[in-house]
Amino acid sequence: MIPITDLEVILASQSPRRRQLLDLVGIRHIVSPADIDETYLADELPEAHAERLAREKAAKIASHNPDALIIGADTIVVIDGNVLGKPIDVGDAERMLQSLSGRSHTVMTAVAVSHQGRIASGVEIVDVTFLPINDDEIRSYVATGETMDKAGSYGIQGYGATIIRRVDGDFFAVMGLSLTRLVALLGELGVAYDFLR
C-alpha cells in the first residue's frame, strides 16, 4: 500500500465543502476543477448519472496529471423521480425548497478516485427529511445566498441544518463527499489513508 501522504492529491472540484472535508481528515490537496458536459444521457438513471460524472471529472484531470491521485465527486438530489440540481435563479431555489418541505428525498453522492491509470468509484445514497417550512421561511433562507450553488438548494452544514428533521445515512455524503467511501476506494487502488501516520 502506498501512503496517501506520499502522493500529490488533486480534487477535481471547486466545491468549498469538499475541500473542507478533505481538510477535516488531513488529506493535503490542491484544487483543479474539471470542466465536463453534465448533460444526462438518454434513459440514464440518477445514480448512474452521478457516478459517470464523478468518474469523468477524475479521468479528465488524471489525463494531465498521470502520477497524481485524483478525487472526483458529484452530488444530486432526487424527489418523486425528479433530479434537483443547482438552482438557476431565486425562483428556482424557492420552488425546489417548496417541493422538499415536510418530505423525504434522496441524496446521491458519487465519488471516484483515479491513480496510475486505474479508477474506482461508488455512490452513497442517503435519505434526508425536511421539516415543514412555509413560504416566508423559504424566502428568508434563499435570501442568505446559501442555496444558490447547491444541489436541491440547501446546505446541510449551514443555515439548512435548521430545516432538516433527520438524515438516514452518511452525513458527509449530503455535504458532498463521503469520507468512508473515499477511504474504501483508496484501498481498492492500493493507497493507504491510515490516519496519516
Image: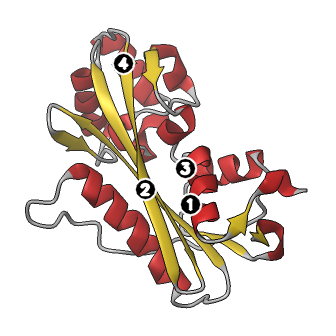
What SS does tag 1 mark? helix
> Mark 3 = which residue?
181
> Mark 4 = which residue?
129
Q: Residues within 10 Å of mark 1 (few under 14, many from 20)?
A: many
Determine the residue positioned at 75% across, 71% down.
Answer: 1
Which callout, 4 or 3, points to the residue nearer the camera?
A: 3
> Mark 1 = which residue?
185
Which callout, 4 or 1, points to the residue nearer the camera?
A: 1
Is mark 4 in CB contact (under 8 Å) with mark 1? no
Q: Is residue 134 visible?
A: yes
Q: CA distance from mark 2 to mark 1?
A: 8 Å
> Mark 2 = which residue?
122
Q: Earlier in the sequence, mark 4 or mark 3?
A: 4
Q: CA distance from mark 1 to mark 3?
A: 6 Å
Determine the residue positioned at 18% across, 53% down.
Answer: 45
Query: 194 or 6, which lies in front?
Result: 194
Looking at the rendered structure, the kind of residue marked 4 is Thr
